[in-house]
Amino acid sequence: MNQIASKGQLRMSLLRWILFAVPVIILLGFLSGQIAGSGEENRWFNALTKPEAQPPGWMFGVAWTILYAMMGTAFAMVLHARGAPLRGIAIVLFLIQYVLNLFWSPLFFGMHQVSAAFWLLITILLFALATTLVFGRVRKAAAWLMVPYLAWLCFAAVLNKQIDWLNPGAETLVVPAARTQI
């Protein structure tokens, strides 16, 4: 026997990476949105004029959960590819684009910086594209798992830009305090 690990052991190693990476990536994404106050409870966001292509609020949670799971699986595949050329660069690129991704919700929903959030999305898209291309050199399946994320980033950038156009004063919009009647 001249193998270091059997195929079964390698599959279990990949499964362990997936079981680590996917929940961490989903949890951090969820926390980013929660901290930023994203979602339908955000009164500032509710006061904005939305583009016609704006999906219902519940769809964002579903879409991001699926996308984060796919991203986490792709990342786990690359983490598992010990000794693969470009593995280190792929990991660094993924982490850069992911940290930028986590900052988008606080920038948009928390700080109300609609224009800056658009440019951040463009930056995320460029890093995610570079990540996907390098992932393809490490593990082709990992690159394919990133493709829906790239498509969603394009869609999100269009929505973000349309919100910017429809709400030129969004950064300075002051929403009146919530009132309750007794």
Image (cartoon, helix red, strand yellow):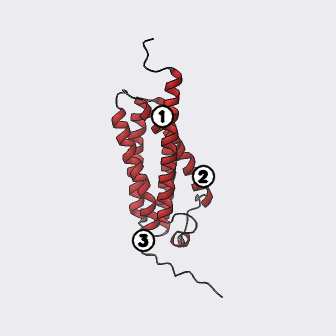
Check disc 1 and report the residue beneath it. Answer: 142
Q: What x and y, as percent, mark residue 44?
A: 51, 72
Q: Is residue 6 above or below residue 178?
A: above
Q: From the image, state whether disc 2 or disc 3 is nearer to you.
A: 2
Badge 2 amino acid: Val
The residue that appears at 48% across and 42% down in the rendered structure is 21
Q: Is residue 32 above or below residue 88?
A: below
In this orientation, which residue lies closer to the viewer: 12 or 104?
A: 12
In this orientation, which residue lies closer to the viewer: 154 or 110?
A: 110
Q: Badge 3, how many Cα within 10 Å: few under 14, some, many 20+?
A: some
Q: Does residue 71 appear in this view?
A: no
Helix, strand or loop at mark 2: helix
Q: CA distance from mark 1 to mark 3?
A: 37 Å
Badge 3 amino acid: Glu
* Image mark count: 3
Q: What x and y, as percent, mark residue 70?
A: 53, 41
Q: CA distance from mark 2 to mark 3?
A: 27 Å
Q: Is residue 173 above or below residue 160?
A: below
Q: Badge 2, how many Cα within 10 Å: few under 14, some, many 20+?
A: few
Check disc 2 and report the residue beneath it. Answer: 62
Check disc 3 and report the residue beneath it. Answer: 171
Point out the residue furthest to the right here. 182
**Contact, mark 1 vs mark 3 (Cβ under 8 Å):** no
Give the mark nearer the N terminus: 1 vs 3: 1
Badge 1 amino acid: Ala
The residue that appears at 41% across and 60% down in the rendered structure is 117
**Contact, mark 2 vs mark 3 (Cβ under 8 Å):** no
Q: CA distance from mark 2 to mark 1?
A: 21 Å
The residue that appears at 50% across and 66% down in the rendered structure is 37
